Image (cartoon, rainbow, N blue to C red):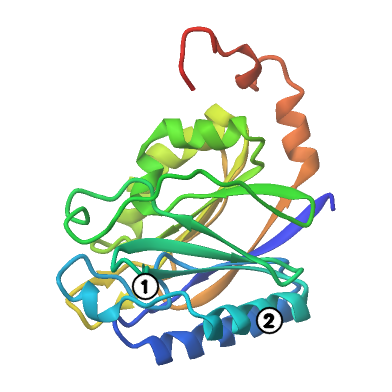
Amino acid sequence: MKTIKAALIVQNCIAGNFKKNLESTLQFISSASEKSAKIIIFPEMNLTGYVSSPDITSICKPINDDLVDLFSTKAKDLKITILIGLAEENPQKEIYASHLVFNTDGSFEIYRKIHTAPFEKKYFTAGDKIPIFKSHGFKFGIQLCYDAHFPELSLAMALKKADIIFIPHASPRGSAQEKYDSWIRHLRARAFDNGLYIAACNQTGDNSKGLSFPGISMLIGPDGNVIYKSLDETQGIHIINMEKAVLDQVRSHKMRYFLPNRRSDLFKI
């Protein structure tokens, strides 16, 4: 596929109301599929809602067979890739900020947030794997919110041939414009330095646990320029397109694609 259409979802996620969040998520999947999206990206922890407080122990969920069967069937029947998030509790009672990737063949994979923010460390266990996923001829990585502040993670994904990095957020406080001004400083650099697309979305609204999120979504091209942005704080579907030709144009330019000229002999990564 030379062009892939994706849907960035800006969603109000009520912390602890799994049923409501699940219903909203399923509605968004149906609507995004009707808009011909091939990948659907939900915010960080959209199913459980987000907190970084003792409340996390009551809202986290295991990845059980019912959850897997539901989204695996959706992905397979609709021939779409679905990226959903939750506070995952494993059998050892460890809690991860996890994002699940449901593939068009019915299989699923997991990314667990590698960089937990300082105020999250008390409650969340950090992941330790950097997987790369595939969908409709494109390769992509996932980072969750605070992950995006660490350039070496994006570099590691680029070296694994990622074409896109999706960055679902649960980033509260401030206005949409203030959040955009914050994100743009580092997200453009991640795209430009590595010659890949960066696509990000956030939760929106009151989560019922004392946090309010400014809805925002954006797509940055492999040349570092903003292709799409929305500062609309209402829930919604934001359709974006990513093209192989644009990637090829940047990656074939001797002065605009930097990875082939890295001094890898001097760096461990």
Does 161 sit left or right of 21 as displayed? right
Instruction: State whether residue 207 appears in this view.
Output: no
Task: Give, as a three-letter code, the residue at label 1.
Answer: Thr
Residue at the image position 42 percent from the left and 73 percent from the top: 46
Q: Nearer the viewer, residue 160 or 20?
A: 160
Residue neighbourhood size for the residue with mark 1, other residues' Cα within 10 Å, grouped as few (<14), some (14–19), many (≥20): many
Instruction: Give the quarter of the image for residue 33.
Output: bottom right
Task: Tell me whether circle 1 and circle 2 mark residues in contact (CB < 8 Å).
Answer: no
Look at the numbered disc 1 and give the secondary structure of its residue: loop
* Residue 50: percent from left, percent from top: 30, 70
Check the image and report above or below for 166 versus 208: above
Residue drawn at (51%, 43%) of the image? 130
Q: Is residue 168 left or right of residue 205?
A: right
**Residue shown at 73%/81% (left/top)?**
34
Mark 1 vs mark 2, CA separation in Å: 25 Å
Q: Which residue is mark 2?
A: 74
Residue 137 position (above or below residue 92): above
Dot 2 alpha-carbon crowd within 10 angstroms: few under 14, some 14 to 19, many 20 or more: many
Residue type beneath disc 2? Lys
Q: Secondary structure at mark 2?
A: helix
Where in the figure is residue 234, as x and y percent of width and height? 42, 77
Counting residues from the start of the chain, the first of labels 1 and 2 encountered is 2
Instruction: List the residue tagged with mark 1.
Output: 204
